């Protein structure tokens, strides 16, 4: 039974990873976060852990002795702009604390997600290359570039097997995203399912890379189960879409759905990111592939909101 420690376990990705691992692996999971889980998954242990607290992190690792780690605790782009110092402490200090604990406790493999937020305004808008990102303009992006540099350092200096993907906007219904720039995608579908008008904080033609959570999970696990990898970080994206395009697809299913556009500070964040990113290495190196296009994503999301299991 593989011993797996997860940080940020109550978040949008954390809660899905726990479910996915439970279904697909014979594992003993310690789920950690700074908040209580809304629902506890049977057979999973839960513990308070603030990744900023190095001594606490070390002691929990020493006690649990994880073989694999999924470090998901992070402050996302929109909230990140509200308090840059806290964002830096959680995202950068938190990451080095986890990397250090992985080395001192002999962790075999770690997953530390990155983001399209590492790209900045000078990056090509379309098909942004995996290796050539410009300087990000958000604190979230700065901390994630730092985190990529930190895990590459820990890999080359300590031979720690860290793997990472740059997630695009992730669309999911289980735990909603609360703090990102791409959250409109989930909010819009949810409002439509509830028969409510939606006020979107981005302009209708703002295109961003996106992906449905089941594809994000299956591809993340596929990467984690490769014996070896050629790169430490891979790009993930299923489709590039905009609020306007999503509105149109939803309106084909719910004709009276209404959207109003009232861009706020998140527009500048979205405009600093590429509209699409290059996923060739993910496809060629280990067979990245997605089942859900945008229409299928919207249909599946609407189904879950209107007839929850
Ligand atoms: C955000 O919007 O901050 C995140 C991300 C793209 O990393 N969803």
Image (cartoon, helix red, strand yellow):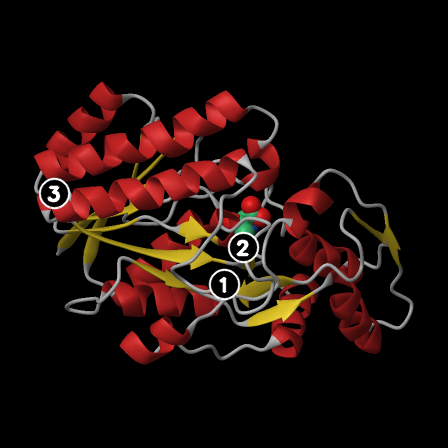
How far across and how far down the image is residue 239, in percent? 58, 72
Name the residue located 35 percent from the left edge and 53 percent from the top edge.
18
Name the residue located 41 percent from the left edge and 29 percent from the top edge.
90
The residue at which mark 1 appears reads as 213
Q: Earlier in the sequence, mark 3 or mark 2?
A: 3
> Based on the displayed image, in which of its 4 quarters is residue 104 positioned?
top left
User: Distance between the Cα atoms at labels 2 and 1?
Assistant: 9 Å
CB atoms of marks 2 and 1 within 8 Å: yes
The answer to whether one can see residue 170 in this image is: yes
Q: Earlier in the sequence, mark 3 or mark 1?
A: 3
Front: mark 2 or 1: 1
> Based on the displayed image, in which of its 4 quarters is residue 137 positioned?
top right
SS assignment at label 3:
helix
The residue at which mark 2 appears reads as 174
How far across and how far down the image is residue 222, in percent? 30, 70
How far across and how far down the image is residue 103, in percent? 12, 38
Disc 2 residue crowd, few under 14, some 14–19, many 20+, Cα 10 Å: some
User: Distance between the Cα atoms at labels 3 and 2?
Assistant: 38 Å
**Side (left or right) of 117 relative to 193:** left
Q: Is residue 81 above or below residue 123?
A: above
The residue at which mark 3 appears reads as 157
SS assignment at label 2:
loop
**Side (left or right) of 198 relative to 112:** right
Q: Earlier in the sequence, mark 2 or mark 1?
A: 2
User: Distance between the Cα atoms at labels 3 and 1?
Assistant: 33 Å
Q: Is residue 164 above or below residue 31?
A: below
Going by the picture, which residue comes out furthest to the right? 256
Disc 1 residue crowd, few under 14, some 14–19, many 20+, Cα 10 Å: many
Q: Establish whether ligand 1 lies closer than 8 Å to the Cβ of label 1.
A: no
SS assignment at label 1:
helix
């Amino acid at each position: 039974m593989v011993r797996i420690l997860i940080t940020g376990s109550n978040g949008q990705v954390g809660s899905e990873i726990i479910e996915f691992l439970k279904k697909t692996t014979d594992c003993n999971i310690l789920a950690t976060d700074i908040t209580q889980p809304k629902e506890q998954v049977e057979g999973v242990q839960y513990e308070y852990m603030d990744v900023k607290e190095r001594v606490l992190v070390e002691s929990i690792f020493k006690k649990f002795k994880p073989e694999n780690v999924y470090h998901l605790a992070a402050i996302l782009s929109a909230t990140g702009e509200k308090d840059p110092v806290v964002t830096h402490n959680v995202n950068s200090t938190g990451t080095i604390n986890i990397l250090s604990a992985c080395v001192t406790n002999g962790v075999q493999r770690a997953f530390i997600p990155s983001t399209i937020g590492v790209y900045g305004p000078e990056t090509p808008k379309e098909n942004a290359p995996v290796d050539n990102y410009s300087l990000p303009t958000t604190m979230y992006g700065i901390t994630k570039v730092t985190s990529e540099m930190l895990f590459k350092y820990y890999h080359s200096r300590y031979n720690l097997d860290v793997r990472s993907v740059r997630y695009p906007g992730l669309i999911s219904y289980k735990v909603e995203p609360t703090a990102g720039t791409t959250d409109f995608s989930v909010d819009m579908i949810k409002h439509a399912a509830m028969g409510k008008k939606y006020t979107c904080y981005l302009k209708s033609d703002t295109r961003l890379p996106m992906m449905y959570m089941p594809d994000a999970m299956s591809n993340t696990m596929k990467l984690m189960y490769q014996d070896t990898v050629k790169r430490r970080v891979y790009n993930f994206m299923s489709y590039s879409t905009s609020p306007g395009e999503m509105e149109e697809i939803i309106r084909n299913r719910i004709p009276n759905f209404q959207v109003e556009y009232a861009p706020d500070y998140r527009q500048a964040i979205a405009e600093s990111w590429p509209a699409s990113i290059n996923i060739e290495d993910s496809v060629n190196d280990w067979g990245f592939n997605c089942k859900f296009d945008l229409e299928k994503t919207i249909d599946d999301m609407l189904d879950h909101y209107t007839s929850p299991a």
